[in-house]
Structures are given as structure tokens and as C-alpha cells.
Image (cartoon, rainbow, N blue to C red):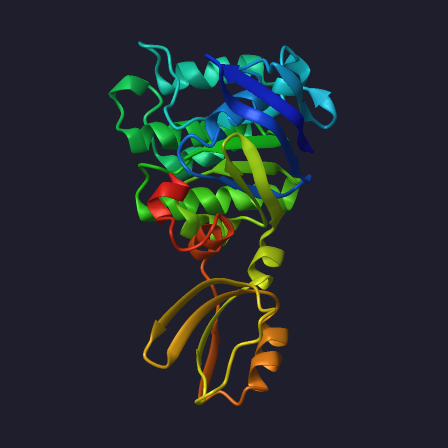
Amino acid sequence: MIETKALVKTFDKVRALDGLDLHVPKGAVYGLVGPNGAGKSTLIRHLTGIYRQDSGEALIDGQPVYENPAVKARIAYIPDEIFYYNQATIRDMKNLARSVYPGFDEFRWRELGKLFELDQRRQVRRLSKGMQKQAAFWIALSQRPDVMILDEPVDGLDPVMRRQVWSELMADVAANGTTVLVSSHNLRELEDVCDHVGIMRNGKMLLERALSEMQDNLVKMQIALPEGAVLPEDLQILHRSENGRLQQLILRGKSEELTERLSALNPLFMDPVPLSLEEIFIYELGGGEHEISDLVV
């Protein structure tokens, strides 16, 4: 559904995107993460047709996005900083969207108004950041888009509204097969909503997988071995820490297989612990030397 092929973009001799390949299946909720300067925002601006690539392709359903109004009419985009005309009210911005997007649904607009409870006559610039995000979601969801591209979409929303917005968005995915790409620093939240994940660094895609596959391939193992027991040399240990006899290992592999292998050492204690999405990203990007804040902003 959403795809890039060998995408390249250079700014002042710095390659913001360096031959990037992206694959987002139709109907997926795809989480895009990476450290500062990875190229996430640059990628999003290619997928929404704002930037023209130096080389490569940015495609929606096999069609190029740049200067393609028919494709752009199928996309709803909510950036981190909401765009609005200086004197525009919520109603003005809604009317603009209705004139541009043929799928705009007036009935949906009225129904969503019961959720967001914003005064359409208020100027957008006089709203708080959280209220601006609510207005953006109100307009975007009313467009009935095939594709939603979101950059820090719920930043500024209170916890109750965050949950309501995600609920509406997931309902669209379930009912209409909407394809969603979301870039966010809140990995705990992404873990709840995403079924696919892509990790970027230095303008390249390091890896993209189904979230379930990613969670199945890394294990945190707490283990205490008897005197003289030695871990198998062929274990893929991404990180190890020790507290007396108790070791904490981050291992690549299936939990069941690793538990079976390590049981043969007759451990005094062994407990496989599920990794959070934050921990998975850290160790996939090179292990415990990375701080979460460096990876996910």
C-alpha cells in the first residue's frame, strides 16, 4: 500500500534519506521509529508529496505521490505542528478540507463533533496545542481517507482524549481497511496500536517486521547457573548483566527453544521475561549502550 524504493534525499550534501526502502501493507498500523536525525520527518514529507526525492520512488498503491492530486486526495496527514491559516476558524479549515478531499463525510463530521466538543467558530491559532490536535483529527477522520500519515499525532492530548482518538482510528482501520503510518516517541503507546514496526537510522531502514515477529525473536532471560556451568558458546547474547550469581541476558531466539536449551544446564533459577517494545528497539539498535531517549524522539 505505502512503499518507497531506494529513496534518496540530500540537503546541503547531507543524505537525509540514503536509499531507503519501506513497505507498509494495506490495512496495517505501522509504527515508524528511530533516533534523532534518522530521517523520519523527511520520509513522511515524501510520502505526503511535500518533498520531491532526488532519486528512488515514493508510492501509494503503486502510484507516485509527488504532484499527483488523485493520490494525495486519498491521504490524511497530521503533522507534529498543525498547519492553519492565521485567521482561520475550525469551520474554515474544515471547509477547505471538504473542497479538496472528495471523500469528506458531513455526517461523520457531525458525529465526531459530539466527541471533540470544540466550537467551530474559534480561531485555530487561539486554541491550545491539544485542542489543535483534536481539531486536526476531527477534520482528518471526516475525510474518510484510505491512508493516514501521523507525526506525533497525540502529543498534547490528555490521557482520556488520547484513548478516544486511538479508538476512533482503530475503528476506521477495522471497518474500512484504512492504512496508518504513525511516527511517535511514545513506544508504549505504539505497542498497543501497531501491528508492524520499522526502525530507521541515518536515512536507512534498519529493519521492518510484524510486531509479533519482533517480540517473538528477542527474550530477556534471568538465570542463575550452578557452579561450573557454562552458557553455550553459540547463544546470540545481545546484552549481559550480572548481580552475584544471577545473570540477566538479552537473547536472540524463541523463548521456548532457549528455555529448553538452558534447562539442560540444570539452572538454580530461570525465568524468561517478555521485553517491552522500548527494550526491543534498544537492543535491535545495538544493545544497552543506547538510551531510550536517544532512540525514540
* Image x and y of residue 196, in percent: 59, 47
Q: Residue furthest right?
A: 62
* Image x and y of residue 52, in percent: 58, 13
* Lateral position of residue 274 relative to residue 211, left or right: left
- Depth check: give the residue in front, 13 or 271: 13
- Depth check: give the residue in front, 22 or 87: 22
Could you tell me which residue is drawn at 54 percent across and 46 percent down? 170
- Depth check: give the residue in front, 151 or 53: 53
Compared to 234, does 51 lie above or below?
A: above
> Which quadrant of the view contains residue 36?
top left
**The N terminus: image quadrant:** top right
* Lateral position of residue 98 relative to residue 157, left or right: right
* Image x and y of residue 26, in percent: 69, 39
- Count of all numbered marks drawn on residues in the image: 0
> Which quadrant of the view contains residue 158?
top left
* Image x and y of residue 65, in percent: 64, 18
**The C terminus: image quadrant:** top left
Could you tell me which residue is drawn at 60 percent across and 65 percent down? 253
Residue 105 visible to an observer of this rendering: no
Could you tell me which residue is drawn at 45 percent across and 85 percent down? 225
Compared to 189, does 271 lie above or below?
A: below
Compared to 76, does 288 lie above or below?
A: below
> Which quadrant of the view contains residue 74?
top right
Could you tell me which residue is drawn at 25 percent across and 20 percent down? 126
